[in-house]
Amino acid sequence: MHERVDGWPELEIHEHRVDRSEMIERCRKYVGFGAMPLACAEFNLHARRCDIWLSRSFAPAAIVEHERLHCRGYDHIGSTGMRDFLARYQQALEGVSSAAAGATRN
């Protein structure tokens, strides 16, 4: 059901149990058109933080554990979303390092 993304950093997990409407507002961008989210995990790799958004009124243990797995670097089998997210982050870091190195050489 899940597979580990190589190189995923350890993130501090913060769980937020909020009104269902707030969870939907935060999470709807991660599901397909017309689908209703049950929860979501948002990653801030720079801050080494993962925020899980759960409905206060509906958060079964299986859903909570599913989102915790995402925070620990596990994506859905066959999905490249998290791997691609990590690659974009690493490329951005390399760009910053290259720019900084160029500035010090001048």
Image (spheres, grey):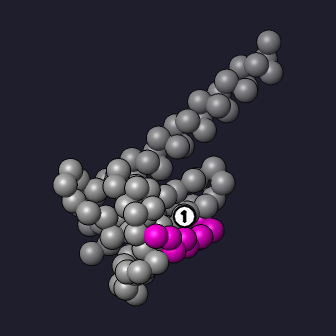
In the structure shown, which secondary structural element does the residue marked by tag 1 occupy? Answer: strand
Q: Mark 1 points at which residue?
A: 51
View extreme (bottom): residue: 61
Q: In which quarter of the image is residue 36?
A: bottom left
Quarter the N terminus occupies: bottom left
Q: How crowded is mark 1: few (under 14 residues within 10 Å), some or many (20 or more)?
A: some
Q: What residue type is labelled 1?
A: Asp
Q: Main secondary structure of the magenta part?
A: strand
Q: Residue at x 42, y 73 (%)?
A: 55
Residue 5 visible in the displayed image = no
Q: Is residue 97 above or below residue 32?
A: above
Q: Residue at x 58, y 53 (%)?
A: 45
Q: Which residue is located at x 47 percent, y 41 percent?
A: 88
Q: State which quadrant residue 22 falls in.
A: bottom left
Residue 9 shows up from this direction = yes
In the rendered view, does 92 fall on the left or right side of 40? right
Q: Is 40 in front, or is 66?
A: 40
Of 44 and 57, the residue lying toward us: 57
In the orientation shown, which residue stands out farthest toward the left? 34
Give percent across and percent down for residue 38.
Answer: 33, 70
Quarter of the figure that contains the C terminus:
top right
Whether the magenta-drawn stretch holds residue 2 is answered as no
Front residue (pair 49, 9)? 49
Range of residues picked out in magenta: 10-19
Location of residue 65 in the rendering, given as x and y in whole percent from the top left corner: 42, 81
Query: What is the quadrant of residue 60 in the picture?
Result: bottom left
Which residue is found at the position 59% from the left and 70% from the top?
14
